[in-house]
Image (cartoon, helix red, strand yellow):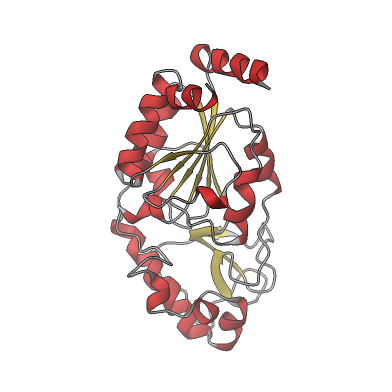
């Protein structure tokens, strides 16, 4: 094991690495996008099993669409945080893939080239009958509300292209990417939903793995994650220094 790790450490200092970021609501909090479970988060005022569920969309379509129209309008003025920008800047020296649970477009605004949205995108709409039908997934202006009676191309009710509670998350491609990462970084997720519970176990144990968060979630992670104890933007400064200067925290972990 140590021989494998030493070989990997040598390679990280000499060649372009594939860094995979797994991001959650915390990375967008500094941009003014509300989180969900934190104090003051969305779930304080909105019942997720009504406003973010497929059953809620069927039973109270206007309320659910109004909730998402509000969230979509919030994105118009939202700007990337320093954390988003730092992730995008790493593309100058490394191959970077962002796997995000966020449905905002801030990674793209920051300039990240490869962003996989595990839970969908507020900038798009789709069919209520078959949300994964490529013919029905379309970009949609953020300032244009989705109303009851608006039709998708298949004649069903138009809806946001997001994964609601009780809907399946397609993560096969993202899982493959996580397993092939040279460096894996978790930012801003409480590791409380099925996606975030699963993904930390996908990267290999012999690659540098980090979690950036002011809360210590390492008890939810496989052994070997390095905790950067701060918010996303400051944590990305530390991580950028770590990557630039030869993964010193990682070397120290393994002795």
State the image coordinates of residue 30 (x, y, percent, origin top left): 30, 52
Q: Residue at x 43, y 66 (%)?
A: 36
Observer able to see residue 147:
no
Q: Quadrant of residue 91?
A: top left
State the image coordinates of residue 19 (x, y, percent, origin top left): 52, 31
Q: Residue at x 39, y 54 (%)?
A: 26
Q: Quadrant of residue 4?
A: top right
State the image coordinates of residue 86 (x, y, percent, origin top left): 36, 35
Q: Is residue 229 left or right of residue 61?
A: left
* Residue nearer the viewer, 203 or 205: 205
In this rendering, the count of numbered labels is 0
Relative to 159, is 139 above or below?
A: above
Q: Residue furthest front?
A: 255
* Residue nearer the viewer, 138 or 3: 3
Q: Is residue 61 left or right of residue 5?
A: left
Relative to 190, is 144 above or below?
A: below
Q: Residue at x 30, y 40 (%)?
A: 234
* Residue nearer the viewer, 72 or 195: 195
In the rendered image, which quarter contains the N terminus? top right
* Residue nearer the viewer, 231 or 180: 231
Q: Is residue 93 left or right of residue 11?
A: left
State the image coordinates of residue 95 (x, y, percent, origin top left): 52, 27
Q: Residue at x 53, y 14 (%)?
A: 15
Observer able to see residue 231:
yes
């Amino acid at each position: 094991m140590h021989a494998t790790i030493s070989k990997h450490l040598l390679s990280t200092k000499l060649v372009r690495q594939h860094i995979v970021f797994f991001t959650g609501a915390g990375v967008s909090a500094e941009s003014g996008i509300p989180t969900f479970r934190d104090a003051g988060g969305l779930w304080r005022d909105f019942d997720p099993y009504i406003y973010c569920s497929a059953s809620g969309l069927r039973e109270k379509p206007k309320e659910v669409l109004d909730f998402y129209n509000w969230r979509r309008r919030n994105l118009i003025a939202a700007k990337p945080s320093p954390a988003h920008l730092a992730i995008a800047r790493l593309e100058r020296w490394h191959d970077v893939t962002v796997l995000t649970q966020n449905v905002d477009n801030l990674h793209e605004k920051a300039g990240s080239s490869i962003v996989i949205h595990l839970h969908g995108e507020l900038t798009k709409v789709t069919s209520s009958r078959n949300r994964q039908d490529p013919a029905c997934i379309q970009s949609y202006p953020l300032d244009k509300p989705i109303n009851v009676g608006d039709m998708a191309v298949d004649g069903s009710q138009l809806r946001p292209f997001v994964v609601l509670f009780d809907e399946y998350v397609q993560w096969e491609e993202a899982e493959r990417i996580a397993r092939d990462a040279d460096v894996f970084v978790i930012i801003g997720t409480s590791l409380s939903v099925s996606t975030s519970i699963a993904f930390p176990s996908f990267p290999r144990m012999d690659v540098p793995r980090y979690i950036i968060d002011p809360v210590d979630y390492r008890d939810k992670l496989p052994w070997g994650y390095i905790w950067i104890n701060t918010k996303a933007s400051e944590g990305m400064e530390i991580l950028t220094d770590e990557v630039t200067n030869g993964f010193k925290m990682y070397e120290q972990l393994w002795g």
